[in-house]
Image (cartoon, rainbow, N blue to C red):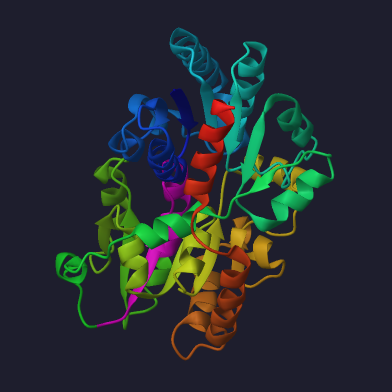
Amino acid sequence: MTYYLIAGERSGDLHGANLIRAIRQHDEAAQVRAWGGEQMETAGATLVRHYRDLAFMGFWEVAKNLGTIRRLLRDCQADVLAHRPDALILIDYAGFNLRMAKWAKKHGIRVYYYISPKVWAWNQRRALAIKANVDRLFVILPFEKTFFNKYDYPVEFVGNPLLDALAQHQPDPEFLTRLGTSTRPIVALLPGSRRQEITAMLPIMLATAAQFPDYDFVVGTVSNLPAALYDEMLANYPQVKRVADSAYDLLKQSVAALVTSGTATLETALLNVPQVVCYKTSWLSYSIAKRLIAVPYISLVNLIVDRPLVTELIQEELTPARATQELRAILPNGTGRAAMLAGYAALQQIMGDPGASERTGAAIVADLRR
């Protein structure tokens, strides 16, 4: 059978790759095309377009690029029609993929959604659009099943694919040697995977790092963005190291982290690293979001445990002074470290076991065969 996957972000590329492998365990003849990245391509997909072309963040940024987004939608739709897959599998990336779902439904293409758009966070009535246009939805957060029940839409909680990725990760035994770090403890700086995130968050993270001379600070960079982007910001911080595409290895060696809000906050918690969550965007995007957001937290960690376990520094609260204060509290011997680690243990219980990709892949193949 033929499968067409669409992921618009780095994390979606990771989960899409694991899903492709799971599908192939149950359908050895599977043919896969994808909008995604290197990891999906390595898993065996024919890569049509890279997710870096889709990386627009924030209301204002999306509005500025509406023409480009419309053109990308048309290109994607034309390619899907040209290959007429048995299944269109959408991975998160709501703005683009919800439009693709509606379009595919009209064209009689079976639609599966893996990793639900965060419709519970804002404009919750989008759940009705998912119900109307998505044949089967596989959710990865425990509270999502309850949320969709309110709309009389039965969805399947398959567990969280981050558990799969973490279970499969093989630590690099040469990581510290490659990094060239000293014997000082490490603090990870994870500024995100989009250009807009990095330009907004990394300068503040670096200014914070300057306040802790007894620690080695290491920036987790991504290779899908040019090194020059980091060079400019790191020029005045020669003591700060960097490492590309090695977030898990970095976190496993770190005593704490400053992390841009997103999937990385949950990864950091599951790796048991105390963290401060950072988020800053344009004034207009933040003003719009503040009026629309329907949940009390921005980090997945706090949403899952339903309390403020990790500190969230948002917009004007994200300053070097506040970040320094909050980071100091979670470093070894800090006043907030033990409570955060205890909260992580509760989070692990809620999250359950690995196997989300396998369960989802098996369900999609079985559904198509029926």
Up/down of 253 relative to 9, above or below: below
Up/down of 299 relative to 35, above or below: below
Q: Residue at x 44, y 51 (%)?
A: 192
Towards the viewer: 227 or 158: 158
Please say whether residue 91 is visible from this viewpoint: no
Q: Residue at x 52, y 51 (%)?
A: 356
Q: Does residue 20 appear left or right of residue 308 in this picture?
A: left
- Image coordinates of residue 252 in percent, x first then y, are 35, 71
Please say whether residue 205 is visible from this viewpoint: yes
Q: Quadrant of residue 111?
A: top right
Q: Residue at x 29, y 49 (%)?
A: 232
User: For the view shown, which residue lies furthest in the front direction?
Assistant: 370
Q: Does residue 39 appear left or right of residue 300 in this picture?
A: left
Question: Where are the magenta residues, as a range?
Answer: 184-206
Q: Quadrant of residue 288?
A: top right
- Image coordinates of residue 228 in percent, x first then y, are 26, 44
Which quadrant is the C terminus positioned in?
top right
Which quadrant is the N terminus positioned in?
top left
